[in-house]
Amino acid sequence: MTRILPVLVVLGALVGFWYAAAVPMNIHGVLDQAERDGVAVSPATGAARRDLGSWGLVIGNAGQASKAWSMERPRLPAPHQVAIELYQTTVLKKITSKRSLVFHAWITLSATLLGFGIGTGLGILLAVGIVHNRAMDMSVMPWAIASQTIPILAIAPMVIVVLNSIGIQGLVPKAIISAYLSFFPVVVGMVAGLRSPDAMQMDQLKTYNASRAATFWKLRLPASMPYLFTSLKVGIAAALVGAIVGELPTGAVRGLGARLLTGSYYGQTIQIWSALFMAAIAAAALVGTVGIVQRLTLRRMGMGR
Amino acid sequence: MSGVDAMIWVVGAFAFWAIALAGNVWLSNSRWRSGRAVRLVVPVVFGVTILVVWEMLVRGLNVPGVILPPPSMIAEQIGQSLPILWEDFVQTFIKGTLSGYVIGCGAAFVVAVLIDRSPFLQKGLLPVGNFIAALPIIGTAPILVMWFGFDWQSKAAVVVVMVFFPMLVNTVQGLAASSAMQRDLMRTWSASYWQTLLKLRLPAAMPFVFNGLKIASTLALIGAIVAEFFGSPVRGMGFRISTSVGQLAMDMVWAEIAVAALAGTLFYGTVAFMERGVTFWHPSQRKN
């Protein structure tokens, strides 16, 4: 309880602050709507209100303030509006419906998981190569580290369009972006992990006359597991971001990134927020799943804390 | 291009790759392999090989310029478009990225110091901060463009949101990094809270703070560029990339990517350079 209570307090404070912030953010729209409905508003015309500060308008029209939490196209939706929209588009819609957020989330998640799998597999292979071959180590590792400073996501539109023009569409281009984004954290983490056994342990295996393959399977690989799982968490979060950004360039109509884009084009702010929360839930679920697998695996290997 | 010419380019590409690979393998196993010169030459040879093989394969296989332009065409485009590239760089990097980076990291540092006196707040904010740092923050870009308008302010806002939580988590970890013995020593000298903070805990936190600053530098540039995909005035690296993609002007796209890569690497390198000066005492800064 002592660990959960502070988190709950902070979350409660955040939600309270959110409700409070929604009032000045939405007040201009609320007063415009009230003026159209014929309610007395001060000042009375939109032109006079346009340059006034939001808090001044709230204080002057306190009676209208509560309407800020139930606007149709708010600048800042209230938490319950986002929650209701989430509930309506996930639980109340059939999964196969194109309006279901679960359907869109699955489109994005499938690209994420495919890319993550490819990126992790290739990353582990490259890491094994780097650790065992000095030429690869000296030539590839500096580029692997340097590439983490390059904004890879900037290439996403180009990759999508180029692959589309040679006929590869839909899932695979997004998966390639996700694979690239999860590839380098896994390489860097695995190389650190495969090199983590200390000199005493390596010497002991040498006294057993262990071949390089035996050393790999019995010492290096088990020792790298903690590093691998840390990198997997970073990689899977990056893969999800890559899949979402990959849906933006071609104006995709399916997927969480597409929902973000259509929401922003059509001014459906609650749709944007609900898609954002769905992406957040998906990211939390993915990282949490990797965390559970990490805990179970490390505990079975005797490395659990 | 005739079939024989194409064959020559392709065979030449493989030959160059084989020679460069052999050279690198020989260098990495030679007796100078731990020297600084070789450690610099091998990755450079690797990078140059990739560029040369790319150029030769694209020419030999006659790959259309709208799919993958050769490096020579990209270099030509860079040379021609320097004013545009500079304008985009100023818009995205200097106005959007740097201002958001300074505001975001500064705010995270201040908040970390403020909540330092309250273990209750720390226990509450750290899990929430860790959670938010793992989320696809880039999804807030359309919302922030709606609030702050199309110009660089919304890009700076996206950068602030992206760097705040990783920086906060790292700074809080750093402030906890001084050992109990060190803090007791300060107490034996009757040091006040602020003296202990300024003379012990903040210097001890610097490795973590710089780790956060380095992570934030990569996130900041990505945030600014991707935020421009959602709406931008007719300048900016993200804007140029997305419109050039629409026009299938791939050489301009690659030129912008080269500028972004250079900017990202220089940014990270500057932060790493400052780290070396400030945290010279830390084991990670030892030469061997």
Image: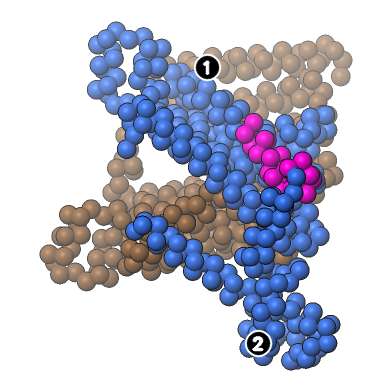
* Nearer to us in this view, A101 or A148: A101
Kind of residue indicated by mark 1: Gly
Image position, residue A43 (x, y; %): 75, 91
Tell me if residue B45 is in the magenta stretch. no
Label 2's element? helix
How many numbered discs? 2
Q: Label 2 is found on which chain of the structure?
A: A
Q: Label 1 is found on which chain of the structure?
A: B
Circle 2: is it few (<14), some (14-19), or many (20+) Cα within 10 Å? few
* Nearer to us in this view, A142 or B17: A142
Q: Which residues are magenta?
A: A95-115
Residue A108 position by quadrant: top right
Image position, residue A282 (x, y; %): 60, 45
Identify the residue under disc 1. B23
Image position, residue A156 (x, y; %): 70, 41
Q: Is residue A151 visible?
A: no
Which residue is depicted at the point 64% across and 31% down? A114
Identify the residue under disc 2. A62
**Foreground label between 2 and 1:** 2
Hue of chain B?
brown
Vertical relation: A191 (above or below) B76 = above
* Nearer to us in this view, B184 or A117: A117
Q: Which chain is blue?
A: A
Which residue is depicted at the point 59% across and 58% down? B159
Magenta: main secondary structure? helix
Vertical relation: A272 (above or below) B147 = above
Circle 1: is it few (<14), some (14-19), or many (20+) Cα within 10 Å? some
Vertical relation: A118 (above or below) A305 = above
Which residue is depicted at the point 26% across and 17% down? A203
